[in-house]
Image (spheres, rainbow, N blue to C red):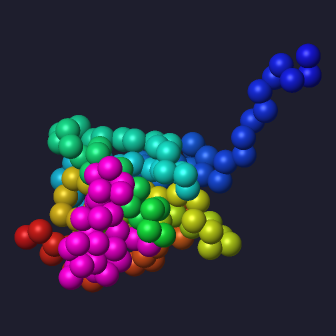
Amino acid sequence: MSDYYVHRLQVALPLATADTIANEAIAAGREAGLLPLTVAVLDAGGHTVVLKREDGSGILRAAIATGKAWGALGMGISSRTIRDRLRERTAFQSALAAASDGRFIPVPGGVLIRNAAGEVIGAVGISGDASDKDEYAAITAVQRAGLTPHPEQPADNWRDAGL
């Protein structure tokens, strides 16, 4: 009978932390005057821990936000870095999209979440405004949650993106 009870799995990105990141991303978006955001927080295995969609955010935004975070986890770098590295490598971008069953979104807004030891414990993806603005909200949220994002700073021109 001792095997009757299920043992709890240890998690590196608890629900409470993921929820804080999602809430802080939405708060950062409101403070910056961004369009309605959708926020996906994934654990290191690519599983959704939290998904929040602000009122008025389009129906494709959840898939895009998840794809940004999923791509960052899959490559081990932010989605901005992926975009920059693959800018001239369209065939490789297509291959990654095929290998990921279309879940790979190589534009800014997918940010890795690292713990104090520098280990990747998950990723946050945001969609709703221009990609650089989405990334700003993601980076800000991870920092406000007391963790370290990759990249650590948003693009210099994030305020002007999409104008």
Q: Is residue 62 left or right of residue 19?
A: left
Depth order, front residue of 70/145: 70
Which quadrant of the rendered structure holds the C terminus? Answer: bottom left
Task: Indicate the quadrant where residue 72 lies.
Answer: bottom left
Depth order, front residue of 160/107: 107
Q: Residue at x 52, y 63 (%)?
A: 113
Q: Position of residue 155 (x, y in %)?
A: 29, 79
Q: Residue at x 20, y 74 (%)?
A: 90
Q: Is residue 95 magenta?
A: yes
Chain part drawn in magenta: 77-105
User: Would you place residue 14 above or below residue 98 in this image?
Assistant: above
Depth order, front residue of 28/15: 15
Q: Residue at x 79, y 32 (%)?
A: 7
Q: Is residue 135 magenta?
A: no
Q: Position of residue 70 (x, y in %)?
A: 41, 56
Q: Residue at x 72, y 46 (%)?
A: 10
In this rendering, the count of numbered labels is 0
Q: Position of residue 114 (x, y in %)?
A: 57, 67
Q: Is residue 15 left or right of residue 27?
A: right
Q: Position of residue 129 (x, y in %)?
A: 19, 58
User: Would you place residue 70 above or below residue 114 in this image?
Assistant: above
Q: Main secondary structure of the magenta part?
A: helix
Any part of residue 109 in sight = no
Which quadrant of the rendered structure holds the N terminus? Answer: top right
Any part of residue 162 in sight = yes
Seen as rendered, the residue at the extreme top is: 1
Seen as rendered, the residue at the extreme right is: 2
